[in-house]
Amino acid sequence: MSSKQNDNGLKGTYEQHWLHARHVADERLWFTNIYVLIVVGVLAFLKVDQPLFLRLGLLLFVLLLSIVGFFMCHSLTVHFITYSRTAELIQINEWGTS
């Protein structure tokens, strides 16, 4: 493989890693937006006088959603860091720039 072909291959790999990192960041942002909308809707619904079992059920739902959301955001953060750091390593090691 010539140096030019190798450089083009590295450039493609570098770009793909950054595209994946951006995609993961967008997924995390969309999940956070949806989470906020659900929590605001539940809190608005709780403001209206509701029976105790319904209030506790909604609060339990928000708690479970928060726990699932935490693990989902943590998982997405791990993927974001992996893709972005790999792209940075390609840039630093192969092209000598930072």
Image: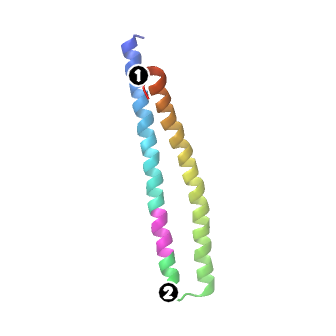
Residue position for label 1 = 9
Q: Do the residues under discs 2 and 1 have CB atoms within 8 angstroms? A: no
Which label belongs to residue 48?
2
Q: Residues within 10 Å of mark 1 (few under 14, many from 20)?
A: few
Could you give the CA–CA distance between mark 2 and mark 1, rounded to whole angstroms?
Answer: 60 Å
Residue lying at 43% horizontally and 29% vertically, measured from the top left: 14
> Within the image, what quadrant is residue 7 found in?
top left
Residue lying at 54% horizontally and 47% vertically, measured from the top left: 77
Q: Residue furthest front?
A: 98
Three-letter amino acid code at the position of disc 1: Gly
Residue lying at 47% horizontally and 72% vertically, measured from the top left: 40
Q: Secondary structure at mark 1?
A: helix
How far across and how far down the image is residue 19, in percent? Answer: 41, 38
The span shown in magenta is 34-42
Which quarter of the image is occupied by the C terminus?
Answer: top left
Inspect the magenta stretch and tell me whether residue 11 lies in it: no
